[in-house]
Image (cartoon, rainbow, N blue to C red):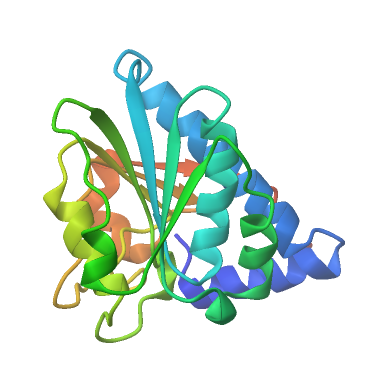
């Protein structure tokens, strides 16, 4: 297992070895899509992929996943937050999004009322709102995203860690994304122990530290 702090240290080490955060994001997004397709290979035909993203690097993984999903499926990205608050690496992957991916910015509940999903449309819902970045109370507009994610019907999958679940302790804040499947990166996080039966680990190319 690996804690969030240990993960951060390994990512910094990877950067020192010439493997950038953008490289890891690309590997994570691609690996996530491959894992989801392998898990649900007989259930994805005709589905629309809806990816919920926030402002952190978990969103960057989601943006990469959107590009790969868009090779086969209609994709909608719901962005909860303001672009000027987005982390630099995530924003670089946001800027790569292009047609036919649909992007919808959401900051208030009124923004949510601007669109609706037809009940007949089958959905694959992707939680890339917070990942390991949960810290205390979930604030708006991320809170709106969690509520909508839980309200919609479909296959529900999380990128790295379900939003609202502490990656180290497994403790949940006042609300969290309820998911069917979790694709976590590099190694199982301690907080995912209780979800082990529905979690897979994907290698994203982080090198092992050589022992002296």
- Which residue is nearer to you in this view: 127 or 171? 127
**Which x, y percent locates residue 173?**
19, 77
Residue at 21 percent across and 46 percent down: it is 116
Residue at 42 percent across and 69 percent down: it is 132
| Left or right placement of residue 39 versus residue 34 in this view | left
Quadrant holding the C terminus: bottom right
Quadrant holding the N terminus: bottom left
| Left or right placement of residue 158 versus residue 176 in this view | right
Residue at 53 percent across and 40 percent down: it is 101
Residue 208 seen: no
**Which x, y percent locates residue 55?**
49, 72
| Left or right placement of residue 206 versus residue 33 in this view | right
Please tell me whether residue 95 is drawn above or below residue 100 in the rendered image.
Answer: below
Q: In which quarter of the image is residue 136?
A: bottom left
Q: Quadrant of residue 65?
A: top right
Please tell me whether residue 164 is drawn above or below residue 100 in the rendered image.
Answer: below
Residue 46 seen: yes
Instruction: Point out the residue furthest to the right here.
Output: 18
């Amino acid at each position: 297992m690996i804690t969030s702090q240990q993960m951060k240290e390994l990512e910094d080490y990877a950067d020192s070895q010439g493997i950038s955060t953008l490289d890891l994001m690309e590997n994570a997004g691609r690996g996530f899509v491959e894992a989801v397709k392998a898990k649900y290979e007989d259930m994805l035909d005709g589905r629309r992929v809806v990816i919920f993203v926030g402002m952190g690097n978990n969103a960057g993984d989601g943006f990469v996943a959107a590009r790969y999903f868009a090779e086969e499926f209609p994709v909608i990205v719901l962005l909860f937050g303001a672009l000027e608050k987005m982390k630099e690496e995530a924003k670089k992957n946001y800027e790569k999004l292009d047609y036919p991916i649909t992007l919808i910015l959401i900051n208030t509940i009124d923004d949510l009322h601007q669109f609706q999903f037809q009940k007949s449309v089958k959905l694959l819902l992707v939680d890339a709102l917070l990942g390991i970045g949960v810290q205390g109370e979930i604030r708006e507009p991320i809170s709106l995203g969690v509520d909508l994610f839980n309200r919609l019907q479909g296959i529900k999958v999380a990128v790295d860690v379900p939003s609202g679940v502490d990656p180290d302790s497994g403790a949940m804040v006042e609300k969290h994304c309820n998911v069917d499947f979790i694709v976590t990166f590099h190694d199982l996080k301690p907080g995912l122990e209780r979800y082990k039966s529905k979690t897979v680990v994907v290698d994203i190319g982080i090198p092992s530290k050589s022992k002296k």
